[in-house]
Image (cartoon, coloured by chain):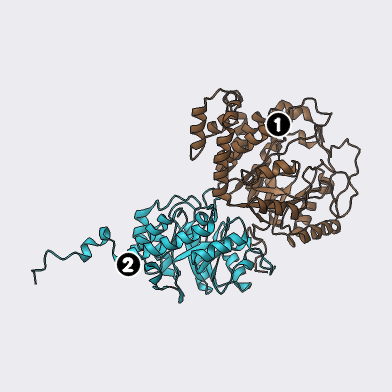
Chain colours: A cyan, B brown
Amino acid sequence: MFAMKNTEILTIAGKEFHSRLFTGTGKFASPKLMKDALTASGTEMVTVALRRVDLKNPEDHILNHLDRTLFHLLPNTSGAANAEEAVRLARLSLASSLSNWIKLEVTPEPRYLLPDGEETLKAAKILIKEGFIVLPYIQADPLLARKLEDIGTATVMPLASPIGSNKGIKNIDLIKIIIEQANIPVVIDAGLGKPSDAAYAMELGADAVLVNTAIATASNPKNMGEAFKLATIAGRIAYLSGLSNTSDIANASSPLDWLS
Amino acid sequence: MSFFDFFSSLDQKEIVDRVYAKYDQTYLLTLINKESLHYYDFLALLSPSAESVLNEMAIKSQFITKKFFGNTMLLYVPLYLSNECSNACLYCGFNKNANIIRRTLSLKEIEQEILFLKEKGFDHILLLTGEYPSVAGIDYLEEAISLTKKYFSSISLEVFPSTEAKYKQLVDAGATGLTLYQETYHLPTYKLVHLSGPKTNFAFRLNAPEEALAAGFRKVGLGALLGLTDWRFDSAFVGSHAKYLMNKFWKSDVSISFPRLRHTPSSLPLIFTVSDKNLVQMILAFRLFLPSSALTLSTRESAELRDNLMGLCITQMSAESKTNPGGYTSNLSTEQFSTDDNRSLKKIISCLNKKGLDPILKDWSNHFQGFNQEPA
């Protein structure tokens, strides 16, 4: 299969990933379904909500089902309402030897769980100083993405549409600007409801996508995991192959060839 | 403006008219398919007319619940700290005039109960008292919370109404949520069933959830005691209360509970029956109106009903509840009401699993909200 030949590597903070599909661990009907879906998705980066994890309990529900040799664990601060809470959670994760990687989520309102840019930037500054590898969840705000890159985040993770909404990429123009300007990997996070949404994000030039709800709440999470895997690869190959509608100008034979 | 002011400014007649208006099915189906419901849409879904579209409401409700909560159910356990009370409420087992065995747990006794519940696997706990400030007041609760915090990630309270300053003491001690049922929003009924004691102050109770959010509680739970008056009337005002609080305190979670009087005490002057069908309509209307709010169904209800509502609209449930102080490790006091679903936590978990739902026992970090400044 052509798709399987894709061996291109994504590097984040010096760590190499062969899969550009990141996944979440929430909302699954059982740990077994989660494990099967994650395996089928080929993901190598898996995010886990720290508030759900019982770090004192080695039998913990979620951690126990994740093979850390297969999946790079990315703890997240979901539920944190401000920078202080997010920082505290990240420190807890590090102190418990879970990881110095942190998916920074600061979502002060419980209705749409939209990220608070101001608090995210504040927390990112503190955590980077303390040596964390920070992957911030943000609105599709190109200036905020720039500011976060300037202070040293490992990626930026703009949302495609509100989390859990399965609406696909609703703020496409801003996402395009972020991708165009970023010098760090751009991971499209939240709202990708269908494999075609993931493929689309990758076609736009995103470096990776993060999918949770669409896989976890599918009737068959395992197959949906695989579908997202294929779609992510397809979108990436399409991007690298130069989509005709986005690369006309760069690749067309020039009408000014005669001008030397 | 407090909620009491807002409530007083509402045109109750208009609201009741809307709840009892006739709506045609096509119109109701349009409402069900809306992405975001207006308060008037919610009133229409509470109407007798909407009984004809319950199935469609259920389908949409299932979709919304899955979208916001996934295939999960949060489980918690109640712990009664005291059954002493200075109120005379006609429907309540702790009524001050009732000849029952009263008890307020000492810290040592609380710890005994906590250890028992922790051992079972619970991590979200609800602490309850009657209203008897001289024995089980704010200072008592503060100590109980500090103790409980050592063992449980999430502590919510179901206690008496108070003020922002006093509630703040409880938030600072480590409590996250406060549940406070108005019992009924129908003032004449409220007066009829609350004969004496501080609870006779309707306005003070009505404003307490707001005081709690101002004090820094992250979650409040609202509800009406179903059976005291027309459930449609009370639902309409629980809905307006929830929306009011969500608008004013945009960072907070507002959850709704559906406590139903199952064995109506003979002391009640009037009996308003709430059938299973009524209860289901009410819960579905709330799910459509408040898609991201947690909806709770306690062990007052039968195992059968609870099982049927898992995955459909309810997102949190208590388990193995005892409603008398000390009830888990001894049995030396009288309960507030008898529970119906007496299955063990293990059994409920296995039921959830069969339904394709993942039980969640921990969904909170004690690093939220300002405690445990440094990682443990």
Disc ID at residue B275? 1
Local secondary structure at mark 1: loop
Residue beneath the point at 57% across and 30% down: B43
Q: Residue B361 location, x and y as percent?
A: 68, 57
Question: Badge 1 sits on which subunit?
Answer: B
Q: Is residue A110 above or below residue B92?
A: below
User: Which residue appears farthest toward the bottom when viewing the image?
Assistant: A14
- Front one among B348 and B159: B348
Q: Residue B177 location, x and y as percent?
A: 67, 50
Give the residue type that dot 2 points to.
Answer: Leu
Quadrant showing the N terminus of chain A: bottom left
Q: Residues within 10 Å of mark 2 (few under 14, many from 20)?
A: few
Q: Residues within 10 Å of mark 1 (few under 14, many from 20)?
A: few
Q: Is residue B57 above or below residue B129?
A: above
Q: Is residue A54 above or below residue B355?
A: below
Quadrant showing the C terminus of chain A: bottom left
Q: Is residue A133 toward the left or the right of residue B145 in the image?
A: left
Disc ID at residue A240? 2
Disc ID at residue B30? none
Number of disc labels: 2
Give the residue type that dot 1 points to.
Answer: Ser
Q: In the figure, residue B244 lies in which quadrant?
A: top right
- Front one among B95 and B78: B78
Residue beneath the point at 70% across and 41% down: B305
